Amino acid sequence: MLEVKDLHVAYGRARVLFGVDLQAPPGSLVCLMGRNGVGKTTLLKAVMGVLPARQGTVLFDGRDITRAHVHARVRAGLGYVPQGHETFPQLTVAENLQVARESTPKARPGTLDEALDLFPALRGLLKRRAGFLSGGQQQQLAIARALVTEPRMLLLDEPTEGIQPSIVQEIEAAIRQLHATGLTILLVEQYLELALRLADHFVILDAGEVVRAGAATELHNDEGVRRLLAV
Amino acid sequence: MGTLNQLVIGASIGAVLLLAALGLTFTFGQMGVINMAHGEFIMAGAYTAYVLQPLAGDQAVLVALPVAFAVGGVLGLILERLIIRRFYGRPLDTLLLTFGISLILQQAARDIFGAPNVQVDAPGWLTGGVDLAGVRIAYNRLFILVLAIGCVVAISLYLSKLRQGRRMRAVMQNRQLAAVSGVATGRVDQATFFIGSGLAGVAGVALTLIGPVGPTFGTAYIVDAFLVVVAGGLGQLKGAVIAAFVLGVLNSFVEFWTANGASFAKVVVFAVIIAFLQVRPQGMFVLKSRALT
Ligand SMILES: Nc1ncnc2c1ncn2[C@@H]1O[C@H](COP(=O)(O)OP(=O)(O)O)[C@@H](O)[C@H]1O
Ligand SMILES: [Mg+2]
């Protein structure tokens, strides 16, 4: 479904990714891991087109989207939840969802309800400004916002980082449920135990390069992996 | 009587300031673009009324309002497409370039309409005034006040009720998040610039009711207009409304108390604003939220 080949990305002169290869087959849940600053967020941004690729290609459903506009990638079926539970702070929860929904011209009528079913707590907060939600609620809103664009693949950047434990459980359950419905997911997750519970494939980045990749079962009790993740 | 009179005058100065500043709450307040040519869009709106005067007679002002909106909007759109778009995130370059554009537009006006000021005659139905509690309020001032209020209402409805307005607010609050939510942000920027510049054109028409029009007509308002937007809190419509009227009233009282007249009043008002921004650099109103710490 998603295929990244030989991707190079830089911020000005500072090169961050050096020829990254990554594949996410349809229906898979790939966990992208690695220490802070190795380039996980940068990789997701380049897949979404928020950052330009210096070299390499990004294929989605076999289509080359390396040069496509960000919004065109969203319409093609890529959903993205950026790191740090981002919202439109001055818009209400309902408006946050509407903005994303209205930009998906052929959206099914039930999408909004399905997203809210996943996080029922949001239903009681629809009129609240997003900036006034707790971090955990903002993260739930952020995921729901991505879902109403009806993605066929979802990129999640550390969705549980700095979130209160009760909501981490809800988010984990939501990811599991989305995966069960056949959604392809690329998840950045620092917490190895959570990754092991959810993922079927893994990719480990170090200093802007893929150093390990494979089936999730290979991750158990692998000392080398624990060293790469510094856990 | 003296106080009420000054209040009325202040409100009408405030309405003028507000009209001149409304467009900037979009382009400067929301997009962060310092467009020095905004004043020349006001000037273009004023000349639009001048051109339409022989054609539309007593209705010229009313006909000119939508036409000037389109004229200002198209000028803004061209500027955005040709120049500003290439310099987002580079405020100093934008400032210098648009300053150059403003000089070019002034020269163009000089070439087309001549250097001397021209007069747009107030229509018959706007001459005279109404007596209110012993204070005489001129109809043209009242018209400007009503127009300013009408524009504010229209803008706030657009921003809160229409999907285009919602999309615009989303882009201004978090451009990258809007893009990854599927919003074509470049298109939204164009719409924002069109509306902001169109409002400058509308302001220009209104300003012909209180004075003559010349090529440098816009420069008289541009600094005050930027001040209103800064003092009101960038992009905050409510803040801009309050700032405009506070400045207008302040101006009229200082002018009244100090017989020295307008230029001294301006100095005092500037000083008050600078002192105010020292205490509250974020303006009168701030976006309050946990996400913006
Ligand atoms: N906007 C930026 N400008 C310059 N360098 C950046 C920027 N964002 C991230 N970096 C650098 O890129 C590298 C990778 O960052 P990032 O992709 O955020 O890592 P991760 O998500 O794996 O923690 C880091 O060294 C970081 O300092
Ligand atoms: Mg990161």
Image (cartoon, rainbow, N blue to C red):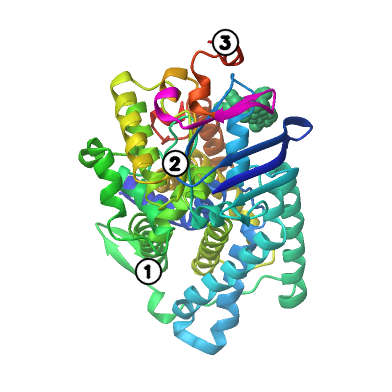
Residue closest to the eye, A216 or A123: A216
Rendering quadrant holding ligand 2: top right
Q: Residue furthest left?
A: A124
Q: Position of residue B14 (x, y in %)?
A: 44, 51
Looking at marks 1 and 2 on the same chain, the residue that comes earlier in the sequence is marked by: 1
Residue range highlighted in magenta = A196-214
| Residue A223, numbered circle | 3
Q: Could you tell me which chain the residue with mark 1 belongs to?
A: B
Q: Indicate which label's residue lies in the foreground, 1 or 3.
A: 3
| Residue B139, numbered circle | 1
Residue B99 against residue B194 in the figure, above or below: above
Mark 1 is on which residue type? Tyr
> Are discs 2 and 3 located on one and the same chain?
no
Residue B200 against residue A227 in the figure, above or below: below
Q: Which residue is drawn at the image coordinates 29% and 60% (left, top)?
A: A109
Q: Residues within 10 Å of mark 1 (few under 14, many from 20)?
A: some
